[in-house]
Image (cartoon, rainbow, N blue to C red):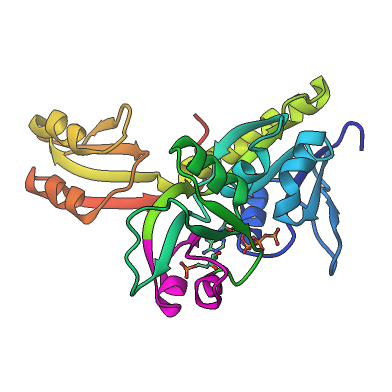
Amino acid sequence: MKNRLTIAVQKKGRLFDQSIDLIKKSGINFSTKGDNLLAKSNNLPIDILFVRSDDIPSLVSNGDADLAIVGENVLLEKSLFKRTYIDKVLYLGFSRCRLSFACPENINIRSFKGKKIATSYPNTVKKYLKDKNINASVVNIHGSVELTPYIGMSDLICDLVSSGATLEANNLKEIETILESQAILIKNKNLSTAKTKIAEKVISRMQGVVNAIESKYVMLNADSSKVQEICKILPGSESPTVIPLENENKVAIHALCQEPIFWETMEKLKAKGASSILVMPVEKVLN
Ligand code: PRT
């Protein structure tokens, strides 16, 4: 595998589907059979490793994997208090969540001082407490964190939240967020020249896929006197194309907008006299 780039992804769980989707949309073709832990790309010198996301930071830091997709929460937890050889390369925009303190709904916690905090993220919580100069004890637990305040194991918890439904189901209320997280592409710091070349291609393609998610191609017709005003409304568009139409007072404006287009934006365009406003999805963007 010396000159083949390895990309580690979570083998099953919340990150799996979108990681595979991103890799495939980046033009890396591979197929997997059953529970195989390794898949070889058949069009690029790349191997995909399927591992637990907890193991990903150390695999990348040690050079056993060259690139990887992991939650930023896991990266931070595994990199605190030790030296790692990892570069953060690209935020991927999926698996968004937050690491928050929470306590039973019927309890008012004014200060964390002297409290017992149960969490699967002990390093992150300890760092937070240290930075704030708070003296509290941290109890490390891997699952069912929400249960711990009810069995006397903790006064409060610090766990990942996305919709908030799990906290609500366990009669817990969110008190404070200490980390916002999403999936991130990471890279070993010391790749060989050959691997760096392949990694650069992968990173640029993944960037193209990520850019495209929010990008839209907008086409509309407008009075030629309104071009400047209309272009100002189009969000994140660099230099729209203006094409004359048969009716000489009218032009067509085409623009790649690298920010979301909301109904409000379309209504503003219409108010400036734009007509036939089309907003189309974009599959890939290479800047
Ligand atoms: O692969 P490995 O087994 O090591 O990891 P894992 O068991 O932690 O994997 P998984 O699939 O549970 O989580 C993978 C990554 O998904 C996490 O590291 C986060 O980066 C991200 N992620 C995003 C989440 C959530 N959202 C999330 N809601 N991870 C966990 N949760 C859990 C949370 O712990 C709590 O139990 O979901 C519950 C809360 O969800 P809500 O929607 O009810 O608030």
Picture quadrant of ligand 1? bottom right
Q: Position of residue 233 (x, y in %)?
A: 18, 38
Q: Is residue 215 left or right of residue 135?
A: left
Name the residue located 63 percent from the left edge and 61 percent from the top edge. Answer: 17
Q: Quadrant of residue 65?
A: top right
196, 52: nearer the viewer: 52
Q: Residue furthest top?
A: 193
Classify 205 as above or below 121: above
Classify 68 as above or below 109: above
* Region of the chain picked out in magenta, as a range: 146-174
Q: Is residue 247 left or right of residue 61?
A: left
Question: Taking the image as drawn, is residue 183 in sight?
Answer: no
Q: Residue furthest front?
A: 114
* 160 falls in the magenta region: yes
Q: Number of callouts in the render?
A: 0
274, 133: nearer the viewer: 133
256, 31: nearer the viewer: 31
Question: Taking the image as drawn, is residue 76 in sight?
Answer: yes
Name the residue located 21 percent from the left edge and 56 percent from the top edge. Answer: 263
Q: Looking at the rendering, in which quadrant would you find the N terminus? A: top right
Q: Is residue 189 left or right of residue 102?
A: right
Q: Is residue 286 left or right of residue 63?
A: left
Q: Residue furthest right?
A: 1
Name the residue located 40 percent from the left edge and 44 percent from the top edge. Answer: 215
Name the residue located 17 percent from the left edge and 52 percent from the top edge. Answer: 264
Q: Position of residue 252 (x, y in %)?
A: 23, 39
Q: Quadrant of residue 194?
A: top right
